[in-house]
Image: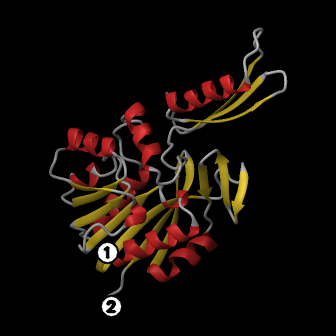
Amino acid sequence: MLKNKHILCVCYINPRKKHPASFYKSSIKQLLFCSPSAILFFTITEYFEVYVKCIIWPYTEMIMTKEKPEFWEKSFVEKQEMWGFEPSKSAVLTKEFFVEKSVKNMLIPGIGYGRNAQIFRENGINVTGIEISKTAIEMARKHYGTDMAIYHGSVTDMPFDQNQYDGIFCYALIHLLDSGERRKLIADCYNQLADHGYMVFTAISKEAPTYGQGKLISDDRFEIFEGVKMFFYDRESIAAEFGEAGLFEIAEVTENFPFFLIKCRKNKQ
């Protein structure tokens, strides 16, 4: 079992029987979906020798492609409860913070199948979610009951209601979006906060080993694998993007990846 570390393995295949390059590409892409924690980088040589560089991550919420319904639906159909049932470290820290601040109702954009939601509910907080995958929503209802409201749709289409929430928790999602989508998500979440409400985001740091890998898309944003684009934050970019959304604290938290825990507070208008 993988715990608190990542594993790097390099595989080399030199088949006696030659196959078209597409054969190997297809096989390698299947490996990506078979293992919920693998990103594969590969090249096919002119002699059909295959080099596979495989980075194994226990947590892949932060590395999957941005809000594409078909991608997430396929992932949840094939891999089901791919992250287990234990809440993330960031969720535990945010729960403690929300309990301290007497948060009573909260929104979780990108709720998945609910593993990060249950810890809040167990502490008397009413949770509403947004999730792009119908399968994930069905799984959440199966495991945690039908009394948790979950809107089916993309976070890029917020808002889904006119409610004001005491707290909002967005885990490992914002860095998968482009700059315009990130700005909109921050603004949409801030607009749905009640006066003196709090929102907490987790975002990947430039200290992550994947920073700088792959194709440069824009400043600090890379296409690490086909369709997997990530923006890597530092304290300056956090201040730039969250500065007008009540930013008051930036903490560091490590969950196999180095993350930032970003806290904002809405002052009374």
Taking the view exactly as shown, the residue that stands out farthest to the left is: 147
Render colour scheme: secondary structure
Residue 149 as seen in the image, left or right of residue 215 = left
Q: Is residue 208 above or below residue 6?
A: below
Snapshot quadrant of residue 191: bottom left
Give the side of residue 110 with respect to residue 243, left or right. left
Q: Mark 2 points at which residue?
A: 269
Rendering coords of residue 215 (x, y %): 73, 52
Pick whichever, 108 or 162, lies toward us: 162
Q: What element carries label 2?
A: loop
Residue 192: which disc? Answer: 1
The residue lying at 31 percent from left, 75 percent from top is 192
* Residue occupying image coordinates x 21% and y 43%: 141
Q: Which of marks 2 and 1 is nearer the N terminus?
A: 1
- Categorize mark 2 by other alpha carbons within 10 Å: few (<14), some (14-19), many (20+): few
Residue 17, percent across and down?
75, 9
Which quadrant would the C terminus be assigned to in this image? bottom left
Relative placement, left or right, of 267 versus 59 is: left
Residue found at x 47% / y 51%:
68
Q: Which of 54 and 48 is in front in this view?
A: 48
Three-letter amino acid code at disc 2? Gln
Q: Which amino acid does label 1 sit on?
A: Gln
Residue 213 visible? The answer is no
The single residue placed furthest to the bottom in the displayed view is 269
Tell me which residue sits at (54%, 56%) in the image: 176
Numbered disc total: 2
Nearer the observer, 108 or 72: 72
